[in-house]
Image (spheres, helix red, strand yellow):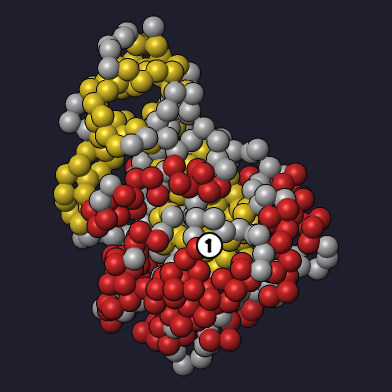
Amino acid sequence: MYDKAIINGNVYLENGFAKTNIYIQGEKIALISDTLYEALDVLDAKGLEVLPGLIDPHVHFDLDLGFIRSKDTFKTGSKAAAYGGVTTIIDFLEPVDSYELLQNALSVRLNEARQTAIDYTFHACIKAPKEDLETFVKTVKLLGLKSIKFFTTYSESNRKTPDEAIKKLLDLSAQHNILLLGHLEDDTLIHHDDAFTYKDLLKSRPSVAETVEALKMIEYLKHSDGKLYMVHVSSGNTVEAILENGKRLLGLQLFLESCPQYFTFTDKVLNQDNGMLYTLAPPMRSKEEQALLFKRHHAFHTFATDHCAFNTSDKNKNKLSEIPLGIGGIEFSFGIMRNLLGDSVINKMTKHVADIFGIKNKGQIKVGHDADIMIFKPSKSIIKQHHGGTDYSPYIGVETSGYTIHTMVRGNYVIKNREYLEHQGKFIKE
Ligand SMILES: [Zn+2]
């Protein structure tokens, strides 16, 4: 007798969909079989798709921007995530300049994340490092984390890591098997002008800043064995330049992430009356650049959200410098990307993420893996409501390929029949 069974579903296994049944014992997938066995709790998933729970590796819940915090907390954000079939997130620690501050940075986030409904872990973040980088990298690993994010921009808020330190980090990433995440924009090409309104966002953060910085990193990678994961690629020109200059690095040393917002919106939204609600960094690009993203979408290894949600009152300013940059979207990432790019997005939001970030026993429906499962109803429709903690979502009115009916985290339903059930997620530490 199994604890739970999900029967008659269209199940996404390693190489595609198959009609079969999943049996769950405790937190794990115990059996995948065409034969019907007894279970205490049986869910008939006829007509539904049974997929691995999504892993979103780029999330900012309760992010401290200094003058404001992002408005989805771990509690409200993880609820929205569960409604989207996301069962694991990777958020970020506060950027620090010394290994001595890492333990505290982790403790602070663990405390803030106590009410997360789904499983979670963190990327460490580095600023301009003060001392021995090797100790920094070793400390990150000792804390059970596997990745370090750096910024090549945001010098104005003292978050930029200098090039010499990035080069050293790349070498250390190979020696210590740690992944570097890069927010790549050439800081010298970012313009801050007090007269800028939100409509000037692309003048402030032009796509060439992203392209130039990506090309520089490709040159560094060619002289290193290090591994770099480029977050939130926004510009089609950047992808073209990477393919021209660093194609052989892809999937080996260089991994590319993009986000639903860059495939859904163009810079045109900034000219709407509520254009300030679509401000983020990097910004949505031109129609031409977006067309290139679609053309080159196979180059991406993952799709993540960079979820960083605010209320309309937080964003409702004219002056660019007064608007917190970031938008939410974790609830809709899969339905939207599936609608735009088809089944190729499934592995990019599950298995590839687990592989790249070394998350064990997640990302696939497989015997012995955690029973992290999303049950999806394919049904083209328009998004009408969201379940996050903010008063708007930019995705209301956007077309989706369907929606999640049930979400299970380690054998527990967190969403059942579109109803949210309280659940306590777990910090993944290895
Ligand atoms: Zn981010």
Q: Residue at x 32, y 17 (%)?
A: 33
SS of the residue at dot 1? helix
User: In the rendered image, which residue does mark 1 sit on?
Assistant: 249
In the figure, residue 129 lies in which quadrant? bottom right
Residue 384, percent from left and from top? 21, 53
Above or below 270: residue 143:
above
Residue 238, percent from left and from top? 43, 74
In the figure, residue 143 lies in which quadrant? top right
Looking at this view, name the residue that lies furthest to the front: 248
Q: Camera-side residue: 329 or 74? A: 329
Whether residue 129 is visible to the viewer of this picture, yes or no, is yes
Above or below 364: residue 206:
below
Figure quadrant of the C terminus? top right
Q: Residue at x 21, y 49 (%)?
A: 401
Q: Residue at x 43, y 87 (%)?
A: 203
* Mark 1 crowdedness (10 Å alpha carbons): few <14, some 14-19, many ≥20: some
Q: Camera-side residue: 268 or 197? A: 268
Whether residue 418 is visible to the viewer of this picture, yes or no, is no
Q: Camera-side residue: 115 or 286? A: 286
